[in-house]
Image: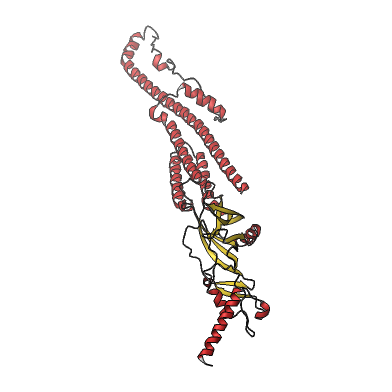
Amino acid sequence: MTWFQQGLSFILGSLLLAASTCHGKLVCKEGQSGPTHQSVKAVLDLQPFRPAVNLSNPTIANISFTLYAVLGVNEKAQILTTFLWLRLFWHNEYLVWEPEKCDGVTRISLPVKELWSPDIIVYEFVDDDVSQACPYVYVNHTGHIRWDRMLRLVSACNLEIFSFPFDVQNCTFTFGSYMHTIRDVRLSPALTFSEMSENSKQYLEASGEWELVDLLGETSILRFGIDEWDIITFWVVIKRRPVLYVVNLLIPSSFLMLIDILSFYLPPHSVDRASFKMTLILGYTVFLLIMNDLLPSTANGTPIIGIYFSVCLALMVISLLETVIITNVLHHSSMKYQEVPNWVRVVVLKHIANLICYRWPDDVRPSHKAQEDKPGSSSCGTEAWVIQPVNQADRHTASNADTVSLPELQLICQYLKDLRAHLLSVQKESELLDQWCHVGYVLDFLLFRIYLLLISCYAMVIITMWCIWISQS
């Protein structure tokens, strides 16, 4: 065969290939499975152009995805990182053949870089696409192309962390064409939104910290100026699994608060209670420093669990302050020997004691009037020493004896006076100490009940709020 004959046959083959391409059908040869390489190559050369015989007809693209995993939630940067299995369909009017003429072949795979593909993007994407590439697509004999790929999606999301760790997040994924308007590309979901939600729940149900609550979506048209774009908006509702944070944060904090409550049963006059509470506050502060990495932080607000820890620390400080006040009251008489004021007797020892049902000891009764030391209670201090004569004969002898013994008797009487005064002082100090101790005990009972009431109300409010959030989610 001469060079002229080879060139002529090549030209005729090219003309036949061009004619088949113009008619929208790929060429198949007998004895060969699938379309010929030359016909496929001719279509691949048209890669820069949208695959429509009539460019006035838009290319139909269908999209669906499966949420496989939630890789991370950055509350401070308001970023959600997820991993999607993305499936994209579109129609290429040039990649069509008849399976009967192509040995029954109905599907072939082609490199996606050699084909025109719709520029579908996620509008919330805020990072580089570092997903693993899937270089091939499946082409059906009717011209429908299916492209399965994996997408590591880093998207912006308005994260609400006030109810952490019982928070529910609602993030938006908006799929649409970046350049092509509805005149060129129309976009629609490949599956129903309920089917996509069920598929995603199967894979995300037992993985990671987050649980998929629901996957919702709708199709709409984005208008900007005179142009319009087809978009599909998905709402991904995820809920955090709180077990990790309940075990590592809430339960240890509750135990420390319980120990602080039980510390009120230590004797109030003991200095060990104050040192015990200071050690407890120090331990709680170290606990908060260690667990600080588990708490989310944003510039928009503080989660309620952070407020919970702050209030618990404040309650511990109030408990320590109460111990300081009671200690000062109990040591008031022994240091200054002051009488208990009458208004303290009436208000504290009478009304407050009755209000909190304070149990007095059997040998102690509350006194509301001040005890006064009445003079004349001792014979040594007030009674005069009288020496009466026995008879006339002994008068002279008695007067001589009185002259000798009277100074010694006066000295003994002075000693007895000093001893009595000391005993009275000791008794008075003991009475003052008992009175101030009972004042301290009554105030300790009162402040303990107020402290217990505050903690109970605070715990009920926190638990009620979290239960409401859990039921609503």
- On the image, which quarter does residue 37 sit in? bottom right
Q: Nearer the viewer, residue 139 or 464?
A: 139
**Height in image: 432 above or below 243?**
above
Q: Position of residue 85 (x, y in %)?
A: 57, 64
- On the image, which quarter does residue 29 sit in? bottom right
**Height in image: 315 above or below 389?**
below
Q: Position of residue 250 (x, y in %)?
A: 53, 49
Q: Nearer the viewer, residue 300 or 193?
A: 193
Figure coloring: secondary structure
Residue 238 can be seen in this image: no
Q: Position of residue 298 (x, y in %)?
A: 47, 49
Q: Residue at x 52, y 42 (%)?
A: 262
**Height in image: 74 above or below 308?**
below
Q: Residue at x 40, y 30 (%)?
A: 334
Horizontal side of residue 82 vs 285, given as left or right = right
Q: Nearer the viewer, residue 116 or 378?
A: 116
